[in-house]
Amino acid sequence: MPSDVFIDGARCLERIRKLYKLWHNTNSEDGTDVLTHENDAIRSADAIIIVRGQKEDDFTYSKTAAMQTWLFGYVMHDVLVVFCQDSVIIFAGSKKINYLKKIESEQNNKENAPRNFNFLVRKDNDEKNFADIIEQIKQSHQGKTLGIFSKDKMDGTFGEQWKDCLSQHSFATVDISASIGYLLSIKDNEELGLIRKACEITGKLYSKHLKDQVVNTVDSERKVKHSKLSEGLEAALSEEKFVAKADLNNVEMCYPAIIQSGGNYNLKFSANVDNNLLHYGGSSIVCAFGIRYKSYCSNLVRTLLVNPSEEMKNTYKFLLACEQLIINELKHDVSLCDVYKLVREKVENERPELLNKMTNNLGTALGIEFRESSIAITSKCTIKAQKGMTFQVSIGFSNLDNPQGTDDQSKVYALFIGDTIIVNENEPCAIYTSSKKDISHIAIVLKDDGSDDNEDDDAPSIAPRRAAIKENPKKDSSAPEESRQEYQKALLRKLNERAEARLTSQDDKVSSERTRKILNSYKSEGQLPQDPDIQDLKLYVDKRYETVILPINGVATPFHISTIKVISK
């Protein structure tokens, strides 16, 4: 455990009270039953066991880790916690016990709170302590059934000792994973703040790093593997500009970032990151990742379209409408299966050819664990959404045909979008991931260098090299005749003003304005050319934008040629 451990005793005790309220099936403050028929397994437990053995080499999601984090704020190894009818037993090493005793100091005998805490310190021979724990379990309710997390392992010496102790007694067990998942799914204000911060970091990483990397790769026609882009995103977590005002030690990936293109798509968050090269020949590029902040998760899914056809654009817009339907209908006390049914009906009625291509799962509750599988927007989940629940909602279509594809890899594409949201009471969900996803922000249209460009036009907004530009509906050839005429009038007026300025000897002013515009070679750092010489901190000349890029203090710094007075060898 870190040296600056702080256990919030009051918060821990309040959350223990929530656990007992759920366990004893106490009605909530508004008089409604806090349980649903899918998480009532906890009712049959006479005692609840949370045990964690030795520290694992790699982090894995588990109910034990989630429960410890929720209660104590940390994951603790070699700790046994037993919740009995009227008491809580905590069995751990002396240092951990000293930290955890802060909980007892907050004990206030409120309703649903345990009457006492029993702290037991581990010693060389723990047989007596184990025997005392077993005796207290037998006195809790009927003393026969233990509530456990059946999928969680009890590894290490401590875990093996506890398993050996239990094997000497004939306790029945019941898996309470779904019950605890429901308990943890409804967030308090502190938890919502952490998820909101995680979403903020996720949005910055996508908009300021991953999207720029993908667009620049497409624009420069470099060969970059999906795995390389994924690794680069994780490396960016160490850069403060993406995680401003956040403790870097508390920022990590929820799962390895998923980048998919070139006809091979698996729209699941368990998909492995492959080593295929990023493909951008008139196809789709799926990007999915999430950031954990102080153990709380977020998720974001976006699809970038390269030279999309009208059919691809229309299907993507329909996908956006489907996600919006989820967000609009996912409200307090609405069954998750009903939300799924509404989306399915929309697809069946409006685009029936997409029905068998739609993802089967439209989202899950998320929090300390990235995915709570027992609370999912599927056809079979009858759990009702509750105010304060957070979800990662996601929907996609796979195996879509693209007849206009330029090669075999672009003949098949997929669309996938997703966001992190919070359930409200009587209004649509609030979206925590704010990265834009309308067609004008995800379509990359490649324009040849030889095409006619007005030299006064600004540099393209998302890629400077091969004129990869975002789809801009304002420049659509189908704009009304009136709009085109207004634009032509404005352009003519501008040209007349410039001509008048020249004729009245105001050339200096015009020249000054022109110079200031030219000096802005790139709009952002992400638009710098992705050339190996720049990465190796060598001098580089960008002929297209008449810019010299110099390494200054280890940072690639662009200078327009008009700012350079003398060049010498």
Image (tube, rainbow, N blue to C red):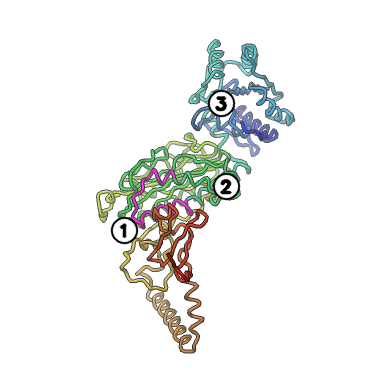
Q: Tell which circle, 3 or 1, labels the residue nearer the N-terminal end.
A: 3
- Which kind of residue does numbered mark 2 sit on? Lys
Any part of residue 369 in sight: yes
Circle 1 residues within 10 Å: few <14, some 14–19, many ≥20? some
Label annotation for residue 197: 2
Q: Position of residue 379 (x, y in %)?
A: 42, 39
Q: Distance between the Cα atoms at labels 3 and 2?
A: 32 Å
Identify the residue at horizontal 31%, vertical 57% (top origin): 311
Q: Tell which circle, 2 or 1, labels the residue nearer the N-terminal end.
A: 2
Q: Distance between the Cα atoms at labels 3 and 1?
A: 53 Å
Tell me the magenta residue range: 206-231
Label annotation for residue 281: none
Q: Are marks 3 and 1 in contact (CB under 8 Å)?
A: no
State the residue position of label 1: 309
- Which kind of residue does numbered mark 1 sit on? Ser
Label annotation for residue 42: 3
